[in-house]
Each structure stands twice: as C-alpha cells, then as structure tokens.
Amino acid sequence: MKQVRIGGQAVLEGIMMRGPASYSLAVRKSDGEIAVDVTPYRSFGERKKLNKIPIVRGVVNFVESLYIGIKTLMNSSEYFAEDEEGQEEQEENAGSSEKKEKKEEKEDGGKGYLVVTLIISLAFAIGLFVLLPSFLAGLLLKVTEYQWVANLTEGILRLLIFIVYIALISKMEDIKRTFMYHGAEHKTINCLEAGDDLTPENVLKHTRFHKRCGTSFVFIVMIISIIVFMFVRTDVMWLRLVSRILLIPVIAGLSYEVLQYAGRHENACSRILSAPGLWVQRLTTKEPDISMAEVAIRAVEEVIDVQEYLECVRNHSFEK
C-alpha cells in the first residue's frame, strides 16, 4: 500500500473523510443509526498532473476541499431537514421511473444550489477576513505615511477578527457539537497514523489536535498574508482592496506548502510552524464522546483498507 494522508471535516452530527479514491459521509441520525454515503472521487490535481507544481497544487487542493466540504455539509443537513419517515414512505409508494426522475431533478437543482452556496460562502469569508481588516487598516494611511504600520495593523486585525468570530460561534449549541465531531475526526486520524487498532476506546485516547487541520491552514494563511502584503504598497484604497483579492490564490498556495512541510516533518522548524495553528484548534475542536468516535471510525473504514494501512504503519512497509 502507498502511504496516503487521510483528511476530513466535521459536519452536522457527522464526519466526512477523504481517501485516495473516494470520500465518505457518516452521519448519526436521530434514531441512533449511522447513515453512510460514499462518493468516488479523484483529485483534479492528480488527473491534470497539477499536484506536482508547487503553489498551484495548493490552490487546486484549497478549491477542491472547499467544494467537497460545503457539499458534504449540505448533505448532512438533509438528514434533519425533513421528516425521514414520511419521506421514506412517499418514496416507497412512488414508481421506479418516477423516483428516478425525482432523483435527477434533485441532483440538477442541488448542483446549482451548491455553486451558489460556494460563491456566497467565499464572498462572506473574503469580505469579513480580507476586505474589512484591509479597509480599516487603510484608514491609518490618513494619519501616517508608514505603509508597514497599516499593513501590520491589517494582519493583526485579521487575526483578531478570526479568533473572535470562532469564539462567538463556538457558543452555539450546534457548533459545539460540530467542534466535538471535529475532535473525533482528529483523534481517529491520529489513532490510525499511530498504528493503533481503530476502536472507539483507542480513538479517545489520542489527542484532538492535528498539524494538517484546516484551522491550521487558515491561521497560516493569515500569517503568510501579513508577510506578502508587506510588499504591496499603495495609498489608493480601491487598489489596496483589489490587490488583496488578487493575491488570495498566491497566499493559499504558499500556505499549503508550509502546512504540508509542517505535517510531514518532525523537527524544530515544523513545530514552530505548527504551534499557532495547534493553539487555535483549542477553540475549533472539543473532546468528543464515544458515539462520535464510532461515526469517525465508520467514515474512515469506507475510504481505506484500515487493517492493511495499520500493518504498513506498524511494519514501516509503505511503498515508496
């Protein structure tokens, strides 16, 4: 077996896990059953050989992760959006051709809705975490001629807005549970990568922090943005804002390379790079319960041969 790096995401009452050839969605339904949906998927970067081009592969991975993340988040919410029993009864009474037609209509509409949701989510994130701090810091140029002061202030404001935003939404009950599932996702991956048997009890023994977490990626993006924007100097507000938007792909690509380095190495440099993101994960992950660990394990089992992977970890026998 080739060594693969499993990644995932917490969703509403469940977890998405992404493997080398598919991604799975495991959700704990209201009746206690774990519903699982597996989608075959091959990365666009692998199909187009873009995964070998530094920075470009980071941009591709970021867009793909965002697309899959929003899609699975929306799919998980569907389990609780309608009365399941009434829906199942209605589908059972429908004819096969009618069910097929309804399914196609739902898929077509779902794709359009997903694209709109993706655009709105990006617009919100860019507005709150990119344009707002840039605009506020840009006002300093009216009272000081030092561009670096405004740019450094912009970076600090961006970090503060992000941390305050996470702290506020963590007070919501649904978000608290999602952060608990986030912790279960990390613990399961850590358990797998340590070569321990994938049982709920073993999973809960591991740390809820992980160096390749998306939270760490976002934090690294903000640190990299401070450095990059130090070299972009303009007194014109609209040029300042446009430059921030245009440089997002570059910053995302650079941040991906930093995160990959930190995740694959264990040295002083990688520990320093990982430290801020691991600290922020104290906000975005919570200790899960055993039922959440069961969901995470189920999600992993759907995208990888767990026993073969564990044997390769224990024997250090992954293919080069």
Image: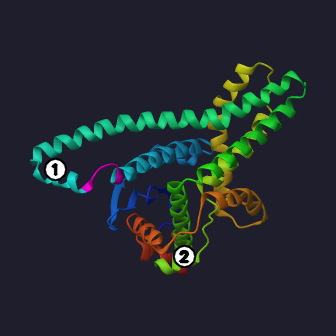
Where does label 1 land, which residue?
90
Find the magenta span and give its range.
Answer: 80-84
Q: Main secondary structure of the magenta part?
A: helix
Position of 73 compared to 141: left or right?
left
Identify the amino acid type marked 1: Gln
Q: Secondary structure at mark 2?
A: helix
Q: Looking at the picture, how far across and down is residue 115, in whole percent? A: 42, 35
Sequence-first tag of 1 and 2 = 1
- Please, what is the three-letter code of the amino acid marked with disc 2? Leu
Q: Nearer the viewer, mark 1 or mark 2?
A: 1
Left or right: where does residue 295 sit relative to residue 230? left
- Could you tell me residue 317's position as x and y percent? 52, 76
Residue 181 horizontal/vertical position (percent):
50, 63
Name the residue located 45 percent from the left edge and 37 percent from the top edge.
Answer: 117
- Residue 160 showing in the rendered view: yes
- Report the residue marked by disc 2: 204
Q: Residue at x 11, y 48 (%)?
A: 94
Secondary-structure class at tag 1 = helix
Q: Can residue 320 be seen from the camera position used here? A: no
In this view, 228 is above or below 262: above
Tell me the colour scheme of the image. Answer: rainbow
Q: Measuring 78% from the left and 42% from the top, which residue is drawn there? A: 156
Question: Does 83 lie within the magenta span?
Answer: yes
Q: In percent of the image, x 63 and y 42: which residue is there?
A: 252
Mark 1: give few (<14), some (14-19) or many (20+) Cα within 10 Å. few
Q: What percent of the width, then of the height, locates residue 103?
A: 22, 44
Q: Which corner quadrant of the image does residue 272 belong to?
A: bottom right
